[in-house]
Amino acid sequence: MDTYLTTMQVAALSIAGMCHALLGSIKVPLARQLQIDESRVGGLVSVFGFTLIPMAFAAGIFADSFGRDTVLVAGFVLLILSVLVLAHLKSYGMAVLSVLLLGTGWSALVNVLNATQGPSFLPLDEIAQRLSYAMNLGDFVFGMGAFLMPIVVGYSLRRMGLRPTFLAFAALIVLPLALSFAVDWQRIAPAEAVASSFTFSDLLHDKIVWICCIAFLFHVPVEACVATWATTLMMDRGVEEKNSNVLLSAFWLTFTVSRLIAALSMPVLAALIEKWASNVETDHVVVIGLAVIMLAVVLGLVTSRGKRQTSTLLILAGLILGPIFPILIAQLVGHVGAELPTLEGRAIGLFFCIGGIGWAVVPFVVGKLADRVGLQRAFLAVAACSTGLVAMCIVLYLFA
């Protein structure tokens, strides 16, 4: 393994996780500063999702055509610009601009980082057999960034204020940017001789690719809505603002730890499952089970009336949500790597592009419904997405 690649990957995944949790971490002070309601907060989350739709796929095309390193550097630069705009925020329009830059830069990062998870954490000859391990391990690092973000932001806001907090974060992003220039990108680039073997049409005609993408379409708004409105749900049930931020960090901690547990336990689960059904892949059993439990958790949030029950369900949601994405994208990248090896960037881009539709639409709908019927009842839309995820995980098992 390339030491520089692994070090850069860890630093970049941490930054990507922090950016993923950024809106949820600053939602309350941002809404207070700009004097906006839940509907407009939901609008900002939707802007992030809408940005993913074209830019995630564009990042995949550029990564396949011009190299992953070029796309990664551009992503870091856009994230720095986004945070600098947040540091000088004076209007809702500037907040929208910042989220547009954030979504574009984040799209570039996640496209490249998901393609390099395997070679960053495994020898090249073990990637095909242990990709789910690498994805969960890498996303554990991503989750650590998301876990730390609410704690760091809460502390920094109290000590320094909004602008110095964002300026410090912009400076932090420079670290993985600098490390990316030391990576031997040629070592992990697809061979040129194979590059002409496949076309984008082959990708569009692959049913496994589409099933994985649609499963992500249902999954990502569940994760986005729970993370964005976790503090609001708790505060509505009587939890103090300070304690709600601590519990949001607990949500991200369980979200993170569940991925490490999944990475370490996959071999054990595989051995147990093989005893009962040798033809069933561990990934399918785990992801279906997690999706079913997540549906029950969301329905519990809709009906919860006490602060202890709501807080417990939100922490449980983090534990269940964590491994779902790594398993889904491992199934996608593993399949494409075996069948369409030079289209990984486009496949990952399509995955996030379609997921971005759910990311854009559902939080916007939840925000609008929350203004009319209350946030808890609005989460019935999230329950509908959870139901769709269960269905698509079962379909993926049947067709794989």
Image (cartoon, rainbow, N blue to C red):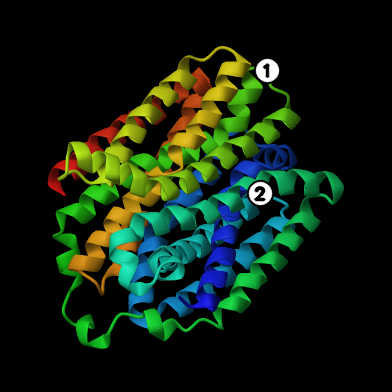
Asked if residue 390 shows in the view, the reply is: yes
Tell me if residue 69 comes above or below residue 109 in the rendering: below
Q: Earlier in the sequence, mark 1 or mark 2?
A: 2
Percent x, y of residue 236? 63, 20
Q: Do the residues labelled 1 and 2 touch (CB within 8 Å)?
A: no
Percent x, y of residue 199? 18, 73
> Relative to 54, is 177 on the left or the right?
right
Q: Which residue occupies 47% across, 44% down? A: 261
Label 1: which secondary element = loop
Q: How many marks?
A: 2
Tell me if residue 196 comes above or below residue 201 in the rendering: below
Q: Which residue lies furthest to the right in this view?
A: 159
| 1 vs 2, front mark | 2
Q: Which residue occupies 64% across, 39% down? A: 249
Residue topped by disc 2: 149
Quadrant placement of the N terminus: bottom left
Q: What residue type is labelled 1?
A: Gly
- For label 2, the crowd category at 10 Å Cα-Cα, with few meaning under 14, some 14 to 19 and many 20 or more, is many
Percent x, y of residue 294? 40, 30
Q: Which amino acid does label 2 sit on?
A: Met
The quarter of the displayed image where residue 52 is located = bottom left
Q: Which residue occupies 47% across, 26% down? A: 369
Tell me if residue 130 comes above or below residue 23 in the rendering: below
* 17 vs 128, nearest the viewer: 128
Residue topped by disc 1: 238
Disc 1/disc 2 C-alpha distance (Å): 24 Å
> Relative to 223, is 386 on the left or the right?
left
Percent x, y of residue 332? 28, 56
